[in-house]
Amino acid sequence: MAIQYATFAGGCFWCMVKPFDQYDGVHSVTSGYTGGHTVNPTYNEVCTNTTGHREAVEIEFDDRVIRYEELLNIFWQVIDPTDAGGQFHDRGESYKSAIYTHSDEQRLAAERSKQALQDSGKFSAPIVTDIFQADVFYPAEDYHQQYYKKNPGHYARYTVGSGRAGFIEKNWGNYS
């Protein structure tokens, strides 16, 4: 194999790009929408929680450089996998966490990874992140792409103000 895709929903997609963007083997991280019933949804439509879509990132990666399992480990460390109502201060269906798998191998790896996190005892509450088969991915509007680079001040304030940074620091000790 070589080029593959991984798709993760972890709440606000602005906060889901930077954690993956910094790794060798990751070619691109695109913010967008997936899992819903509306064709070419807009940000405003998805925010109504009526389209069935979740904010997500689609990661193009070279599995000869970074394995899917490594991406799963990164994913678990940037979300609250026990929150069934959204992520941090972003609430509703469009902000719920999910892993969208692109193959049977990815599905099995995701299921093993989720079970390992549950079995680890790291969290006292159940791991509720959904695992779905990947569906059509719609890139978000340009102003959402690479938001952490385009608006670093706002991005930094948002990650702290939303509670994400504190949660990661408390549970993993490595927020950056």
Image: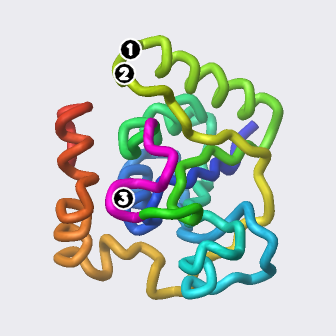
Q: Earlier in the sequence, mark 1 or mark 3?
A: 3
**Cα distance, mark 2 to mark 1?**
6 Å
**Cα distance, mark 3 to mark 2?**
28 Å
Q: Residue at x 36, y 58 (%)?
A: 18
- Whether residue 86 appears in magenta in the rendering, the answer is yes
Query: Could you tell me residue 40's position as x and y percent?
Result: 74, 83
Which quadrant of the figure has residue 103? top right
Label 2 element class: loop
- Whether residue 38 appears in magenta in the rendering, the answer is no
Disc 1 residue type? Gly
Report which residue position mark 3 lands on: 18
Q: Residue 66 carries which label?
A: none
Q: Which residue is drawn at 62% across and 55% down?
A: 60
Q: Give the range drawn in magenta.
A: 82-90
**Cα distance, mark 1 to mark 3?**
27 Å
Disc 3 residue type? Lys
User: Badge 3, how many Cα within 10 Å: few under 14, some, many 20+?
Assistant: some
Front-lying residue, 72 or 2: 72
Query: Could you tell me residue 21's position as x and y percent?
Result: 42, 56
Label 1 element class: loop
Q: Earlier in the sequence, mark 3 or mark 2?
A: 3
Lateral position of residue 131 relative to residue 55, left or right: right
Lateral position of residue 126 relative to residue 162, left or right: right
Disc 2 residue type? Ser
Q: Which mark is residue 121?
A: 1
Label 3 element class: helix
* CB-based contact (under 8 Å), mark 2 and mark 1: yes
Q: Which residue is drawn at 56% across and 40% down?
A: 129
* CB-based contact (under 8 Å), mark 3 and mark 2: no
